Amino acid sequence: MTRTPLRVASYNVRYAGLDAGRLDWSVRRDGVASLVRDIDPDVLAVQEVWMDQLPDLRDRLPGYDWVAFPDRNGEHTPIAVRRRRVAVASAGAFGLAPGGDREVTAWDAAIPRTVTHATLRDRRAPAPPDADGRTVAVFSVHLDHAGERARLEGARLVRDRVPDGPVVVAGDLNCQTGSPPYEALTADLTDARLAAHERDGPDRTYVGFDADDGVSGDPAARRIDHVLVRGCAVERYRVVPHDADAPASDHFPVVADVVP
């Protein structure tokens, strides 16, 4: 029997409160939701979501259930699942810090970081849920933007905490292909971009809002958002650009159609 792919998207939507005018969250939030609806994911891993942004996403994306664990530091990495397709079997969160402690600024990080994870069951699978491997663990990750050691140690912590079986690690890893954090993760996981039968979209995933944002103009250096898999076939990988005249975020969403 042919399995229907599960569409997983990763999207850094940028903090509220950092920008004004046409880049204010109150202006961008409809564009974020519109882009997500166009992508039509079964699972959405989101980064840079403050808790006061989450109600805006909930309201604009009916049909999704949300896995979110609030911390006092404000930033979160929630996961949205299309309720008619996916059920949440279990969920949790841990900090990118020694021992997985949350609300801790570890190593040389700029801020505390939290990873959200959920084990998902495909409602289209036969019972029992895991009879043919149709459960998958999804991790939404945002590695630190400032600390090189924090990125590497965070990547190792995520790698060591992924369970056996099909896994998708999706997020803003703040590192490019070949960097130490990327290599740490891909020692056990596969880059969906490389595994995909079909690839579409621009090479870069970070685009910024400023012409001079201190990031190299090399598209590969701006490919810092990744979807990594294990135990999943990847049918299609794509980076989805937004309207340059009305940017929804300073990142493009990354999408992978996977078959656990």
Image (cartoon, helix red, strand yellow):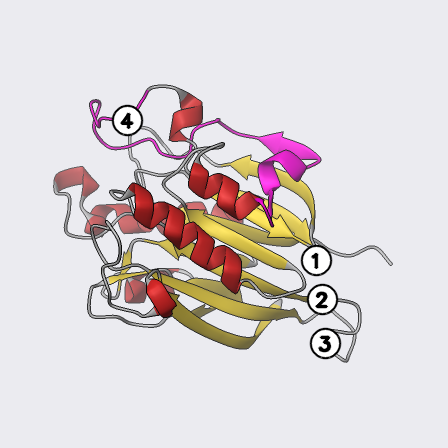
x, y percentage for residue 169? 52, 53
| Residue located at (51% from left, 56% from top) | 159
Residue 152 drawn in magenta = no
Q: Are marks 4 and 1 in contact (CB under 8 Å)?
A: no
Residue highlighted by disc 4: 215
Q: Is residue 187 left or right of residue 133?
A: left
Q: Is residue 143 left or right of residue 193?
A: left
* Residue type (three-letter) at the residue carrying disc 4: Val
Q: Are marks 2 and 1 in contact (CB under 8 Å)?
A: yes
Residue highlighted by disc 1: 260
Disc 2/disc 3 C-alpha distance (Å) = 7 Å
Q: Are marks 2 and 3 in contact (CB under 8 Å)?
A: yes
> Bounds of the magenta span?
187-216
Residue highlighted by disc 2: 134
* Residue type (three-letter) at the residue carrying disc 2: Arg
* Residue type (three-letter) at the residue carrying disc 1: Pro
